[in-house]
Image (cartoon, rainbow, N blue to C red):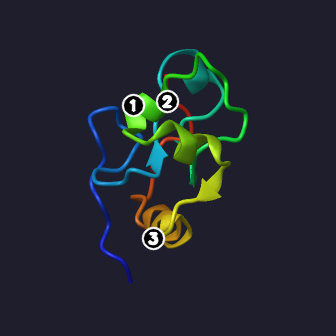
């Protein structure tokens, strides 16, 4: 059995988990948790700021979306670590 993890101050996301997070702003209206198991994008929009935020070289980012190496395993472990009685919606 996996040891349960603690929740972040937002009351929904798990401490130490970078793949599953609580969306902020209007995105939080749709679901209390979100995940982004991919890195990169193939659209190559000239105005995109994401490569700078991720500290990726623009050609590497624009090469396409690829699964993060450990995302499936990490997400599965994180999901099974959710404390029982976790709220299904943020208010």
Q: Residues within 10 Å of mark 2 (few under 14, many from 20)?
A: few
Which numbered mark, 1 or 3, is in the foreground of this view? 1
Say which residue appears at 71% left-offset and 41% top-offset. 42
Q: Are marks 2 and 1 in contact (CB under 8 Å)?
A: yes
- As drawn, the label of residue 91 is none
User: Do callouts 1 and 3 mark residues in contact (Cβ within 8 Å)?
Assistant: no
Graded by Cα atoms within 10 Å as few (under 14), some (14 to 19) or many (20 or more), the crowding at tag 1 reads: few
Tell me the tag on residue 77. 3
Report which residue position mark 1 lands on. Answer: 53
Precedes in sequence: disc 3 or disc 2 = 2
Tell me: residue 16, above or below residue 4.
above
In this rendering, the answer to whether 46 lies above or below 59 is: above
Tag 2 residue: 50
Tell me where residue 8 appears, x and y as whole percent. 29, 41
| Residue 50, horizontal then vertical, whole percent | 49, 30
**Element type where label 2 sits in the image:** helix
Q: What is the CA distance from the residue labelled 3 to the residue labelled 2?
A: 27 Å
């Amino acid at each position: 059995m996996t040891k349960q993890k603690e929740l972040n101050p937002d009351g929904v996301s798990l401490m130490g988990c970078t793949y599953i997070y609580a969306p902020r702003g209007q995105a939080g209206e749709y679901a209390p948790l979100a995940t982004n198991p991919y890195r990169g994008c193939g659209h190559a929009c000239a105005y995109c700021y994401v490569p700078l935020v991720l500290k990726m070289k623009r050609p590497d980012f624009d090469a396409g979306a690829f699964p993060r190496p450990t995302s499936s395993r990490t997400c599965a472990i994180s999901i099974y670590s959710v404390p029982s009685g976790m709220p299904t919606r943020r208010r």
